[in-house]
Image: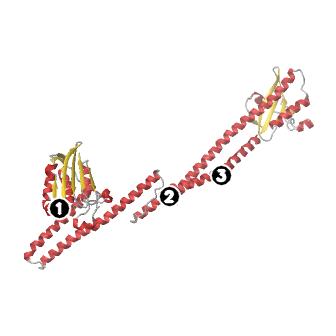
Amino acid sequence: MKLKLFKKYFLITSVIILTSLTAMMFILSVVLNNYIAKSKYETLSMACDEIVEYLSAEEDKGNAADTKHFFSVIRTVSEVSDMDIFIAVRDGRVTVCACREWEQNGNCQHTSHIIHKGELEKLSDSKNLRLTTLGIYENPHYVTAKPIYDGDRHIFTVFATAPLSLVRNLLSAVTKLYLISAIVPIIIMFFAIYAMTYRMTKPLKLMSEASRAMAKGDFSKRIPVTSDDEIGELSASFNMMTNTLSNLEGMRKSFVANVSHELKTPMTTIGGFIDGILDGTIEPEKQKYYLNIVSEEVKRLSRLVESMLSMSRLESGEFTMKPQLFDLRELIFTTVISQEQRIENKKLEIKGLDELQNISVNADRDLIHQVIYNLVDNAIKFSDDGGALSFELKNENQKTVFILTNTGSGIPQKDLPFIFERFYKVDKSRSNVKNSTGLGLYIVKTIVKAHGGTISVSSKENGPTAFKMILP
């Protein structure tokens, strides 16, 4: 069974934290153990030095050490330092011990054993703490030893020992203290990790749910943007993508409906008139009139199919540009003249056409002709009767700028960002009258972009609309 992202992230983070705490505890134990061992060595060494100094001081005074007083000294040092102190002669026999048993009986655990000579030599020559049983103890002890010389002759060795269990008990106590003190922070940390993980993965979970909904055609879900980090940016981008897909889906449905209507209407008209001619319902003298109508409908179907084919070629990148140097002013003139009948029918005023400069551009003439044709066609189509078309052509910053402005009802501000998207139609209520498929401006933008240029639109409702094309 696959782990959810939330569980996976929570578990990984928890394992990392627990591993880090364990490593910290291990490092702390090693450091503390070394520190305690060093401290214990210093304590044992100081105890031995105290005894050696006492004996040396007594010898310098020429006094023999008083047994009771000497025992009192080593007994005090032993109790204060919590250690065993005893003295062994050269052959390893323990002759004096600081324990109470030796004080009472003159004999004890230490005096009943003889320290091996090799062990005695190692301890006497060593400047470090050693861990050994000395043949006396059952369990290892920390041991330091200081030899006492009479001239060059080694006569005694002072031993100070402490059980290893003391260090272990101290380490155990520190470990327990560490664990007890870490419980509350660990609990708080786990709750914090849980909350943080939930907060971080919740948008991803919502995106997953929204994606499944989109796969079923539901584009209504949106992701709340609750932060300005990468997750917040991803949520915002996801919402933008959803909006775009929703718009595209709406445009696709609208396009299919429009194309279906555009195909159905002329096909019905064509079929009806042809059937009327064939069955004699339409009189012979009126057949030419209706055949002209059929011809116009066929041309309209051809334009629709050509637009869809152009869109398909542009999207697939199949078209190949054939740039050549030509006069853009002449191309604009030719295009406007081809629409003279429509301009006359709507009584449109043409402004600035006769003032255009002679400007040559290096581009694909046929594709640029399609751009100019679509722009002029749109301008005429959406101009009110008695309105005006204004033309402007100029060179600006080593670029060619063409501006076409028409009067009319304008384009609502909410529609301006989508005007060049495929299938998009602003005036859906009049789409049937305008004979638009929503592909013209998308094709225009694609062609201009392929030439390295840009095209933009500025408009306001019940005001003029201006399309601005810039070519390099």
Q: Quadrant of residue 109?
A: top right
Q: CA distance from mark 1 to mark 3?
A: 83 Å
Q: Is residue 406 left or right of residue 102?
A: left
Considering only order in the chain, which callout, 2 or 3, is on the residue closer to the N terminus?
Answer: 3
Q: CA distance from mark 3 to mark 2?
A: 27 Å
- Location of residue 232 with respect to 33 vertically, above or below: below
Q: Is residue 257 left or right of residue 118?
A: left
Residue 331 x, y percent position in the rendering: 15, 52
Quick check: can you spot residue 100?
A: yes
Camera-near label (1 vs 3) is 1
- Residue drawn at (84%, 24%), measured in percent from left and top? 56
SS for dot 2: helix
- Location of residue 38 with respect to 422 vertically, above or below: above
SS for dot 1: loop
- Residue drawn at (42%, 64%), measured in percent from left and top? 213
Residue type (three-letter) at the residue carrying disc 3? Val
Residue linked to disc 1 = 386
Residue 285 x, y percent position in the rendering: 7, 76
Q: Quadrant of residue 379?
A: bottom left
Quadrant where the C terminus is found in the figure:
top left
Quick check: can you spot residue 107?
A: no
Residue linked to disc 2 = 202
SS for dot 3: helix
Residue linked to disc 3 = 184
In this orientation, which residue lies closer to the viewer: 201 or 329? 329
